[in-house]
Image: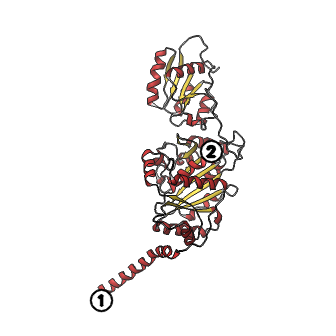
């Protein structure tokens, strides 16, 4: 029995209630007070306040929900170590995240009477969780190593998503890809776009958990990395319990405070703990890529270059691929080309694009402006609607990544002259404009 625990003598139980959800508090607190069995002594608003509250004298139990600000499995474990019995309210979709929590659990939406009965039983040491949640298997490490501290041996697969300049939709694709990859094991999505991080507003994430706070913790040992990641990772969406996300910088100017050791070591540390890691690089300059790959020699990784399907997008994609070709650090077969927002009615075929750019096309993702618009409005992951052709294309790409295969070939197609001419047209137009400008200046001086 924990210290100060009620011993079945019928006295009022002194409880700490830390729910972090005003609506749930309004539904539960009156019922707890009216029952006459409880005295709510404190109502912490964050995990740090909860830890301080349970350290107080004569606390019989704590009622906590996963909605509490900055609550993570590691911080909950620290609270449980105080000896105060804890009843955790969690959503069914969160089973994977809280599977190893050393506390009694109950469904978040349970009736007030059920919560009160479970809280009394928890204080007396009699309550057990209504169900044993499954532990999400990684498929690459022994059970219990998914959060891996010193003994972690998992080597997950890392997929970097790099967008060509011009708004190719790399972040949208990275988010959808992480959701699809989660079907094969625990997945994490990390926003390492240092110029224009956008996962925070895209998915309505908690802004206090982010890359900057992770770097501020300055983890060094595997155990420190595990604790820091537990604090900063958060669920991608309630409908996708197998995906966690590390939000990017709240403001781009914060990148000056990031340590290179933490920033460049992050993909490898995530790969030690999760089966699949998706890293959104945004429109990073290709010359900066080797710093992210220096610690990944022993880890399977791929680089997806995402380009637009229109002529301007292909123009920027060609420039990006040429820069990547010049990097001796990168192996060509690890770089896959993805053509985004593709519409076969207006755009050249994948075979034409591959031959002209000199790079196999791993996937073409159909344009789905209406679906993306609905996802943005609801702040949910894109390409999750049933029957979406874009969702099918992303799922097929995820399957290829899981299996490590790419079937695309560089077969010479017909009708290349139109595409090559269209790609070369901006150069010709620029030359003609410069020539015309020179002639006009000469005429002006002569006059």
Q: Position of residue 386 (x, y in %)?
A: 51, 47
Q: Position of residue 422 (x, y in %)?
A: 46, 74
Nearest to viewer (mark 1 / mark 2)? 2
Q: Residues within 10 Å of mark 2 (few under 14, many from 20)?
A: many
Q: Is 166 situated above or below 246?
A: below
Q: Residues within 10 Å of mark 1 (few under 14, many from 20)?
A: few
Q: Position of residue 64 (x, y in %)?
A: 54, 28
Q: Residue at x 52, y 15 (%)?
A: 37
Q: Nearer the viewer, residue 352 or 293?
A: 352
Q: Residue furthest bottom?
A: 446
Q: Residue at x 58, y 26 (%)?
A: 86
Q: Nearer the viewer, residue 27 or 194?
A: 27
Q: Residue at x 51, y 76 (%)?
A: 417
Q: Looking at the rendering, in which quadrant would you find the C terminus?
A: bottom left
Q: Which residue is mark 1?
A: 446
Q: Residue at x 50, y 58 (%)?
A: 366
Q: Quadrant of residue 186?
A: top right
Q: Looking at the rendering, in which quadrant would you find the N terminus?
A: top right
Q: At numbered mark 2, what does the secondary structure look like: helix, strand or loop?
A: loop
Label 1 and label 2: CA atoms lie apart by 72 Å
The dot on residue 186 is 2
Q: Is 109 situated above or below 172?
A: above
Q: Earlier in the sequence, mark 1 or mark 2?
A: 2
* Residue 329 appears in the figure: no
Q: Residue furthest top?
A: 9
* Residue 293 appears in the figure: yes
Q: Is 375 situated above or below 358?
A: above
Q: Position of residue 141 (x, y in %)?
A: 71, 44
Q: Is 90 situated above or below 39?
A: below
Q: At numbered mark 1, what does the secondary structure look like: helix, strand or loop?
A: helix
């Amino acid at each position: 029995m924990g210290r100060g625990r009620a011993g079945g003598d019928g006295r009022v139980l002194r409880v700490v209630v830390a729910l972090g959800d005003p609506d749930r508090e309004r539904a539960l607190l009156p019922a707890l007070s009216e029952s006459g069995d409880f005295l709510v002594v404190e109502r912490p608003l964050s995990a740090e306040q909860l830890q301080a509250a349970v350290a107080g004298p004569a606390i019989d139990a704590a009622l906590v929900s996963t909605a509490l600000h900055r609550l993570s499995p590691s911080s909950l474990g620290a609270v449980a170590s105080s000896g105060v019995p804890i009843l955790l309210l969690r959503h069914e979709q969160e089973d994977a995240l809280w599977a190893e929590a050393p506390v009694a659990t109950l469904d978040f939406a349970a009736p007030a009477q059920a919560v009160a009965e479970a809280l009394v039983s928890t204080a007396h040491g009699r309550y057990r969780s209504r169900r044993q949640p499954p532990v999400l298997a990684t498929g690459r490490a022994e059970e219990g190593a998914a959060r891996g501290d010193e003994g972690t041996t998992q080597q997950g697969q890392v997929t970097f998503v790099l967008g060509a300049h011009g708004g190719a939709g790399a972040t949208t694709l990275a988010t959808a890809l992480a959701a699809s990859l989660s079907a094969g094991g625990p997945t994490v999505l990390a926003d390492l776009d240092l110029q224009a991080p956008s996962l925070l507003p895209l998915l309505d994430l908690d802004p206090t958990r982010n890359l900057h706070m992770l770097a501020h913790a300055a983890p060094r040992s595997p155990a420190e990395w595990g604790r820091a990641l537990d604090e900063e990772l958060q669920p991608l969406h309630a409908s996708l319990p197998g995906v966690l996300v590390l939000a990017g910088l709240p403001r781009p100017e914060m990148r000056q405070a990031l340590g290179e050791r933490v920033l460049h070591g992050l993909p490898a540390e995530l790969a030690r703990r999760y089966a699949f890691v998706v890293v959104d690089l945004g429109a990073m300059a290709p010359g900066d890529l080797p710093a992210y790959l220096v610690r990944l020699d022993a880890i399977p990784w791929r680089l997806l270059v995402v380009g637009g399907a229109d002529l301007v997008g292909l123009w920027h994609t060609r420039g990006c691929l040429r820069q990547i070709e010049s990097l001796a650090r990168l192996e060509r077969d690890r770089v896959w080309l993805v053509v985004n927002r593709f519409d076969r009615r207006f755009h050249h075929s994948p075979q034409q694009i591959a031959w002209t750019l000199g790079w196999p096309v791993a996937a073409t993702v159909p344009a789905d402006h209406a679906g993306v618009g609905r996802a943005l409005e609801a702040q949910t992951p894109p390409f999750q609607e049933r029957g979406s052709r874009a969702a099918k294309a992303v799922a097929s790409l995820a399957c290829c990544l899981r299996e490590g295969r790419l079937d695309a070939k560089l077969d010479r197609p017909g009708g290349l002259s139109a595409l090559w001419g269209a790609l070369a047209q901006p150069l010709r137009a620029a030359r003609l404009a410069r020539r015309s400008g020179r002639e006009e200046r000469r005429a002006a001086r002569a006059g």
